[in-house]
Amino acid sequence: MVSVDAERGLVLIAEDEPAIADLQRLYLARAGYGVHVERDGQQALAQIRRLRPALVILDVGLPGLDGIEVCRRLRAEDDWTPVVFVTARDDEIDRVLGLELGADDYVTKPFSPRELVARVAGVLRRARGIDGAIVLELGDVRLEPTARRVEVAGEEVHLTATEFDLLATLLRRPGQVFTREQLLATVWGIADYGGSRTVDVHVAQLRAKLGPRAPIRTHRGVGYSAAAP
Ligand code: CA
């Protein structure tokens, strides 16, 4: 069942609806990913620990353990494997975004398999990093793009791939005000991504992790900039 393309990596799909799992498997395999499917949350968690996939596609409504609980348990073990959630309803999106679980992205059913593959590619590209060895520093925050490492006052802080890219984007141009639309385009790579709430939620998560001296300023009605606290 498991065949891993060394370059693309293994994607673990946790999905209990066979028709959806088959479609995801087909498109991801065609795009060159190794694919492993689990239909139950408990099994998915066990296989994520065993197989160490490059990315997990996690249905929220799973039997056994739901997708949110699977992600919560991974993060509790300091496992920051990128996660793309699959949600069925608006209230599930709110749960995914509201709990600071370190979701790197999400799609809502029904979604196009092509869109899912594009999201997977985007999250993996960000997780692997494309920058040179420049260090970005502002206030107490130090970010190493290549190592994808962030420190606040010398203490390492674990960010999701999305939070990391958001911070790096702001820190590359201190003082420049980015609109939410610009951040969506730069960080998420998508021109129109279902509204600005995504940006606001990720900025809030980032601030929560960086602490009271987070070097991010809100420009009401406009967007965000990096600025010394
Ligand atoms: Ca389901």
Image (cartoon, rainbow, N blue to C red):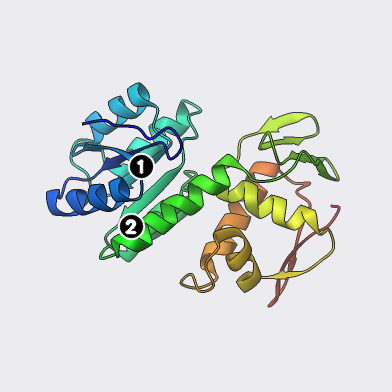
Instruction: Please provide percent x and percent y for residue 97.
Output: 46, 55
- As drawn, is 6 to the left or to the right of 38? right
State the SS at label 2. Answer: helix
Q: Is residue 109 above or below residue 158?
A: below
Viewer can see residue 198: yes
Where does label 2 land, which residue?
Answer: 92
> Can you tell which quarter of the image residue 13 is in?
top left
Q: Nearer the viewer, residue 88 or 57?
A: 57
Q: Residue furthest top?
A: 50
The residues tagged by marks 2 and 1 sit, at their Cα atoms, a distance apart of 27 Å
Q: Is residue 229 above or below residue 14?
A: below
- As drawn, is 32 to the left or to the right of 130? left
Residue at 55% from the left image edge and 70% from the top image edge: 196
Q: Residues within 10 Å of mark 2 (few under 14, many from 20)?
A: some
State the SS at label 1. Answer: loop
Instruction: Please provide percent x and percent y for residue 139.
Output: 86, 45
Mark 2: amino acid: Glu
Q: Residues within 10 Å of mark 1 (few under 14, many from 20)?
A: many
Q: Is residue 16 above or below residue 224?
A: above
Q: Nearer the viewer, residue 139 or 188?
A: 188
Q: Which mark is residue 33?
A: 1
